[in-house]
Amino acid sequence: MDSFQFIDIILLAMVAGFLVLRLRSSLGRRTGHEQGPKTFSSEKVVSINKNDESQAYEHEDEKNHSNSGINTGISEILNLDPSFNIDEFNSGAVKAFEIILYAFSKKDTDTLDSLLSKDVFNAFMTSINEREEACEVLETKIIKVEVSKIISIGVKDSLASITLEFISEQVNLINSQDGKLIEGDPDQIESYKDQWTFHKSLNDKDPNWELASTKSLG
C-alpha cells in the first residue's frame, strides 16, 4: 500500500466508504471545451481550448521527441518521489475522471473541491450555478473510459504536471427538475476525447494531485 499512498488522502477527502477505499488504492502513486477555466459543454464536465484536428496528428520525429520528454519527466518525478509509478497513476486518473464527472453531474461540491485546483473548481461552480438557474438536472452515465496516451510529464520548480488523453463513452441527459427529458437520448452512447492535466507539488507532504485544466479534443 505504500506505493499507493498519494491517492490514499485524495480520496479520503473526496468520497466516503467503499468508493473512497477503492480510489485510494489505485490513484496512489475517464472529452470538454477550453478557453481558460470558464467554458463548459452543457452535457459534459467542464472544459477549460479546443485544438484543431491537425494538432492531434504528429510526425514520427515529433512522437519520438514526445516519448523522450515523457521518460525524462518520469525520471524527474522519481528523483523527488521514488514511490511514483506511472501505471498506477494512470489507473487512478481513470477513477478520478469518473468520480469528477459524476460529482459534477450530482453537484457534489465537496468532492469537486477536494480534487480540483481553485481555478477549475470555480469554473465547475459557474457551470453548476448556471444549470441550477435554468432549473436543469444533468444525468451522466459513463460506459467506458481509458487513458489513450500520455501527452506530457514534467517538473518545474518542484511542481509536477502530467497531461493525459482520455477516451470515454458516455450517456448524458439534461432533464427538467420534474424529470422530463430536455436534451439527449438515453439510448445513445457518445464518444468523447478529452485532455486533462493533473499537478502536485513534490515538496509538499500532502500527496494530493489536483486537476489543473481540461480540454476537449472532440
Image (spheres, rainbow, N blue to C red):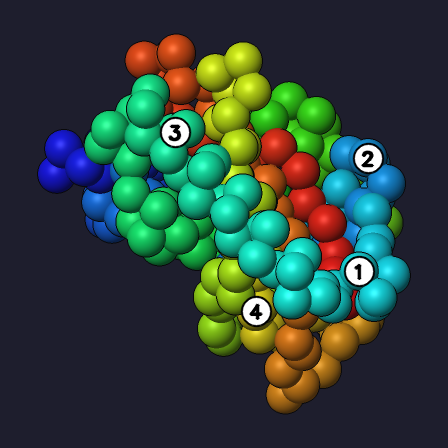
Residue at 52% x, 61% y is 149
Mark 2 and mark 3: Cα distance apart in space: 26 Å
Q: Answer whether labels 2 and 1 touch (C-beta < 8 Å).
A: no
Q: Earlier in the sequence, mark 4 or mark 3?
A: 3
Rendered image: mark on residue 55: 1
Instruction: Name the amino acid type tagged 1.
Output: Gln
Label located before the other in sequence (2 or 3): 2
Disc 4 element: strand
The quarter of the picture where residue 12 lies is top left
Q: Mark 2 or mark 4, which has the lower sequence index?
A: 2
Taking the image as shown, residue 4 lies to the left or right of residue 113, namely: left
Q: Which mark is residue 77?
A: 3
Q: Which label's residue is closer to the chain start, 1 or 3?
A: 1
Q: Earlier in the sequence, mark 2 or mark 1?
A: 2
- Taking depth in this image into account, of 49 and 181 the one nearest to the observer is 49
Where is residue 52 shown, x and y percent of the image? 87, 61
Please say if the residues under marks 4 and 3 sit with CB atoms less than 8 Å apart: no
Residue at position x 65%, y 66% in the image: 60
Q: Earlier in the sequence, mark 4 or mark 1?
A: 1
How far is disc 4 from disc 1 in space, using C-alphas? 20 Å
Q: Nearer the viewer, mark 4 or mark 3?
A: 3
**Kind of residue indicated by mark 4:** Ser
Q: Residue at x 51, y 47 (%)?
A: 68
Give the labeled residue for mark 2.
36
Contact? badges 1 and 3 (CB < 8 Å) = no
Contact, mark 2 vs mark 4 (Cβ under 8 Å): no
Q: Where the C terminus falls, by quadrant?
A: bottom right
Q: Is residue 106 visible?
A: no
Q: Residue pushed farthest left?
A: 1
